[in-house]
Amino acid sequence: MIWNATMEKAGRTEMEELQLTRLRQVVDRVYHNVPSYRARMTAAGVKPDDIRSLADIARLPFTTKQDMREAYPYGLLAVPMKQVVRIHCSSGTTGRPTVVAYTRHDLAVWAEVLARTLVAGGLSDSSVFQVAVNYGLFTGGLGFHYAAELVGASVVPISGGNTARQVMLMKDFGTTAMIITPSYALHVAETMREMGVRPADTALQSVFCGAETWSDRMHDQIEETYGVKAYDVYGLSEIIGPGVSCECSAHDGLHIQEDHFYIEIVDPESGEVLPEGAKGEVVITTLTKEGMPMIRYRTRDLSALRRGRCACGRTQTRMDRVVGRSDDMLIIRGVNIFPSQVEDVLLGLGETAPHYQLLVERESALDMLTVMVEKADGIDGTPDATRAAERKIQDMLKAATGLSPRVRLVPPKTIERSEGKAKRVIDRRAM
């Protein structure tokens, strides 16, 4: 199903003409209404009239999370405060929170792009949609709530946590689709087994996942565990929240809502724009956002872009599943490694549960990585079998990453479960 065929099936020339018009408008708006943007554009020697083609976007300076923190709370507002009707922000656990302000128009855009997302995953006005991500300052819950109502679905606003109740309501209310983080989806499935509830006992048809990086194997495991289709949803608070791009039934990349977001892929080191198909850092410009537009925002997420008509009929540019973040990359004794690489190996074994953590420590001036992962149910837990499994995992990780970490196979339920974003890395080097 397609929610907005005019935009989701637009021709390439038509879409690029619309993008250029909107790009020129947003650049003019921030130049005249946001002093920090005007100062940085002036320093870069560029004015709004210099943007004559989409390629000219490369002349504009980047925006970073640090720019947002320095402008806290309202320094990046492009409209008077009286036009702001909603404020969200990050947790601020690593510094000042990043603030996101929305006008009524912005909220309508957010509901629109998420409606496209949900319909791409089969949601309709006959669906019962369970929101199992947090409401509040986090952008997930409210965004999906209003989008599902726009589609006409019946919304169950349970939020994250209270896992046994999640299972009860899923079964009793006839939930057909839910939004949830990948790690919490596996925790809910684990609780279902403990409660004696089978996926077949529910009406579930679709699981939408976002808010954290997940590997292809994690995607497959969620589908196999629930016996339904899982859909990747991409977005970030600084841009609008979830809804920047999404998977469809073809599962061949994530469709970018190009009429609202212009995405580039750049070299994480040089900042140079990379060609189609090359993997690099995702940089996003909001084309229609009023309250707090973002110009060339460096997400630190790593992906690649592809163009061409999808089997589902959509013509939007697609991005590959985000495989990690440049600032999530661990450098252990000169070897670059992402948590998603470890996850891919662990889930391919069949001997471990999808619950793991990476512990980074410094010993005698050397960085050491320990991979802690739970045994799968029914796996031999004798000392000899455990040591053999640990050696096997270590060898596979070395083959996949070039690094031989220490591996600790731990009993089930040892690693703390997440009801939101999973904490995959514990870095004790600076402690």
Image (tube, rainbow, N blue to C red):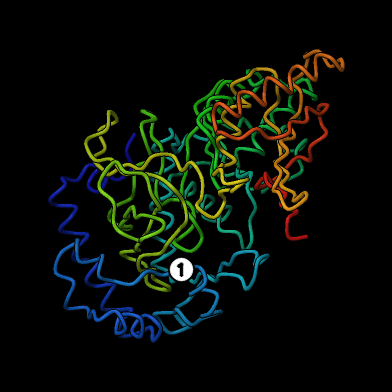
x and y, in percent, of residue 191 in the image: 76, 29
Mark 1, residue position: 64
Residue drawn at 25 percent across, 33 percent down: 313
Question: Do we see residue 316 in this rendering?
Answer: yes
x and y, in percent, of residue 123 in the image: 45, 36
Residue drawn at 75 percent across, 40 percent down: 417
SS of the residue under disc 1: loop
x and y, in percent, of residue 316 in the image: 27, 43
The one nearer the camera, 397 or 181, is 397
| 261 on left or right of 171 | left
Q: Name the image quarter holding the C terminus.
A: bottom right
The one nearer the camera, 34 or 196, is 34
x and y, in percent, of residue 24 in the image: 21, 71
Indicate whether 38 appears above or below 187: below
Type of the residue with mark 1: Thr
Residue drawn at 52 percent across, 38 percent down: 208
Indicate whether 356 appears above or below 217: below
Residue drawn at 42 percent across, 74 percent down: 291
Snapshot quadrant of residue 25: bottom left
The one nearer the camera, 196 or 405, is 405
Snapshot quadrant of residue 283: bottom left
Label 1, residues with CA under 10 Å away: few <14, some 14-19, many ≥20: some
